[in-house]
Amino acid sequence: MGVHKLFDFYSDTKTKPSKAMLHSILNRDFGDEQKDEDSTTLELCSRVATLLGKEKAVFLPSGTMCNEIAINIHTNPGDEIICESSSHIINFETGGPSAISSVMINAIKGKNGMFKAEQLLEAIRKPSRYAPISSLVCVEQTANMAGGTIWELEKLNAVAIEAKKYNLNTHMDGARLLNACIKTGVDAETYSENFDSVWLDFSKGLGAPVGAVLAGSEEFINKSWRVKQRLGGAMRQSGVLAAMCLYALDNNISRLSNDHEVASFLGSEIEKLETVEQIFPIETNIVIFDLSDETISAPNLVQKMGEQGFQIGAFGERRIRIVTHLDVDMAAGTKLVEALKIYLK
């Protein structure tokens, strides 16, 4: 007998647009975004720029493109960027910084996806005719592969302020920034204040099918448009996508707390299982845990769970990631726990 229901906990990128979100497209006006004629896209960019406290913003197909455009603008070939070793930029962008911008990466081994200002100071290159120039510091809010952990505002600002003392640019990968805002009550503008560029992803917890918005100064965004064009990221009637992002802004931010609640429940139940060696701190919507050596491997567990109608992620032989979102509620989480117990007793 086949599996009738699939609960996809692999990532919050797996969300599908609701009927209401799709319907919101019908009442919008569209035009050529490259000529600034798409009023829906312009509205989205204006709202996100205001939300993040920046002068201007640009709509892009993905968050990866946001990161790569920012790196390209903030650096020169041969420079070095600094970020935490588990970051998306290092692990999930196919070597984009080197391939696109010809820059090196200095990876800081932090804790829970974050690093201290003191670690940044150790990583910044001293002036030398032999060494690359440290030119950009990148942070990820929340820290995905650390379990969706949140940079504390004080620590975040300390890193950014120290970077500025040494004339380094600052960039925030804000893919799940609004998860941090909902959890802490700190607004997005406050988190972004000391960063030259920052972006929001709409295709994760906010539930839109495509799209991210990169924000910064007017000069930065004008340059971003040139790189967007160069990378093939320019679109035409992009308001079809932007309309769904606007719907997400109006309807799907506060409900992120529901995802956090389900993740917290999953973590509390999974932690009880004897075959779970360690579980990462759970602050938002991501649950990461390691299996003990004597239990089933992570890839095999993923296979077994898939056969039961649950999609989860394996990251190595022992590590499992589960991500909650608007398409998996508490009832789905309860069923997932019961299925996990069968294989992880």
Image (cartoon, helix red, strand yellow):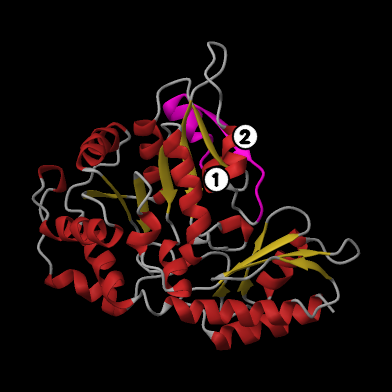
Of marks 1 and 2, which one's residue comes earlier in the chain? 1
The quarter of the picture where the N terminus appears is: bottom right
At x 40%, y 70%, the residue is 16
Q: Residue at x 63, y 86 (%)?
A: 334
Q: Is residue 325 above or below residue 91?
A: below
Toward the right, the furthest residue is 294
Q: How many marks?
A: 2
Who is closer to the viewer here, 236 or 41? 41
Mark 2 lies on a secondary structure that is helix
Query: Label 1 belongs to which residue?
Result: 92
The magenta-colored residue range is 93-111
Q: Where, by quadrant of the figure, is residue 210 drawn?
A: bottom left
Which of the 4 image quadrants contains residue 72?
top left
What residue lies at 26% left-to-right and 75% top-to-bottom? 250
Q: Position of residue 98 (x, y in %)?
A: 50, 28
- Front position in the image: 174 or 276: 174
Q: Is residue 104 magenta?
A: yes
